[in-house]
Image (tube, rainbow, N blue to C red):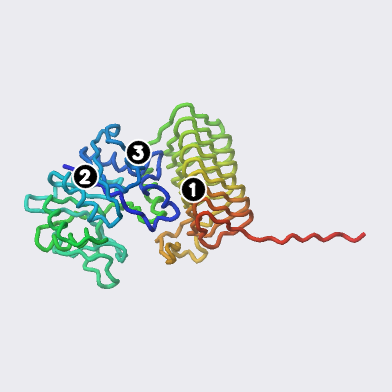
Amino acid sequence: MQAVILSAGESTRFNPFRYFDHKSLIKILGKEILIHTIESIKKSGITDIIIVVSKKEGIKNLLGDGRKFGVKIKYILQEEPTGAGNGLLLASNLIKGDFFLLNASHIDFDEFKNQMVKKKSVKDKAIFLAKKQKELSKFGVLKTDKDRVVGLIEKPQEGKEPSDLRLIGIYLFSKDFLKTLSKIPDEHYRLESAISSFVKKEQVRFVETKIDVPSLKYAWDILEMKNYLLSKAKSSRGKNISLSKSAEVIGKVIIEDNAVIMEGARIKGPCFIGANTMIGNNAILRGNADIEENCIIGANMEVKNSLIMQGTKVHSGFIGDSVIGENCHIGAFFSTANVRLDRKTVKVNIKEKDIDSGLKFLGTLIGGNAKIGIKASTMPGIIIGTNSIIGPSTVVLNNVSENSKYYTKFKEIVVRNEA
């Protein structure tokens, strides 16, 4: 059996991290998301993998032929990001029989593979993975008859949902599906249209999961994915670690090679500390903190439920429920507000539209190479673009586009005492 991975999309809603060749190349727990997915596929027993890629070379350079991961990888080039259906059809000549189709961010594939295979009878032409959910307007929703799939509605209007079952994005198809797909006009929702047509003439069933399945649609989804991976990880210690006697390491903590943890630091797992990273005096890491390689977390900095990418240096302050890009420099007393005063869910402005994150705790999303002055702070759900500069003592109230300066203007007043 084969697995086909779709990884050629442009990720237009993934600000401020769209500059990656693909969003699955972001590192969590020291590995790119796509590598976590490859490892999950291998764990399930599948080693024959087809990856649909764009013209960018990042994924091919990372994975090669797959040999170092114990799998065999072939690539299909999708020159224009016209949708998942077109990407799959381009791979059709390499598909030998029944196959799985999934996105590059399905780090949890092995949890579902066997269940889906067991569900499939000789008469079944496809098995879909589905999950019950209350809010369905952003998903493909199944129309069902017992365990049969008889229709698919993409992003239904509120009150017009055919069921409470949404597609997860892992499919087990027979090769017959490709014939139906080839007859559908080439447009963005070609895959969904083909599925709608296919289920009307063939026997298709679904498997329902109750497991929370991490997705990667928006940048804040990285936090859920990080927490999933930390929940599956085991404590470990690398080589040449310098751990002060007065530092505390509590619970499940992964510490990579050459990390330095200084006096008074307190690390409460689950947490990840990457290679060559330094955790300063009296720093606090807690609640699923992930600090990647070559970072510096300064004295008296508290990091909670956040991902700080490789090479970033932060001084003192508080970073909560945030994603900080690589090679950022953040001055002393920086603070992220991570909850609204009214305690409602945090909204994030994406492409001039306010998107409800569904999260009551969400800090800031900062692109790579940003520089932030001392005593700066951010409001919940703020995006700061790549290569941006935030001035000292500035409260960031609105999104900052890439390559921009954002600062508060001060007026200096000098009053001399009369003699």
Instruction: Tell me the kind of residue under disc 1.
Output: Gly
Q: Quadrant of the C terminus?
A: bottom right
Q: Residues within 10 Å of mark 2 (few under 14, many from 20)?
A: many
Instruction: Tell me the kind of residue under disc 3.
Output: Leu
Task: Give the quarter of the image for residue 313.
Answer: top right
Residue at mark 3: 62
Q: Can you tell which mark lies on residue 3?
A: 2
Where residue 265 sits in the image (x, y, percent)?
55, 38
Nearest to N terminus: mark 2 or mark 3: 2
CA gap, disc 1 and disc 3: 20 Å
User: Looking at this view, is 253 or 378 the one in front?
Assistant: 378
Q: Residue furthest top?
A: 240
Residue positioned 57% across, 49% down in the render: 371
In the image: residue 208, left or right of residue 36: left
Q: Residues within 10 Å of mark 1 (few under 14, many from 20)?
A: many
Where residue 52 sits in the image (x, y, percent)?
26, 47
CA gap, disc 2 and disc 3: 18 Å
Where residue 270 sits in the image (x, y, percent)?
42, 42
Question: Under tag 3, what secondary structure?
Answer: helix
Q: Residue furthest left?
A: 123
Q: Can you tell which mark lies on residue 188?
A: none
Residue positioned 24% across, 52% down in the render: 87
In the image: residue 204, left or right of residue 353: left
Question: Under tag 1, what secondary structure?
Answer: loop
Marks 1 and 3 in Cβ contact (< 8 Å): no
Instruction: Tell me the kind of residue under disc 2.
Output: Ala
Q: Residue furthest bottom?
A: 159
Q: Residues within 10 Å of mark 3 (few under 14, many from 20)?
A: few
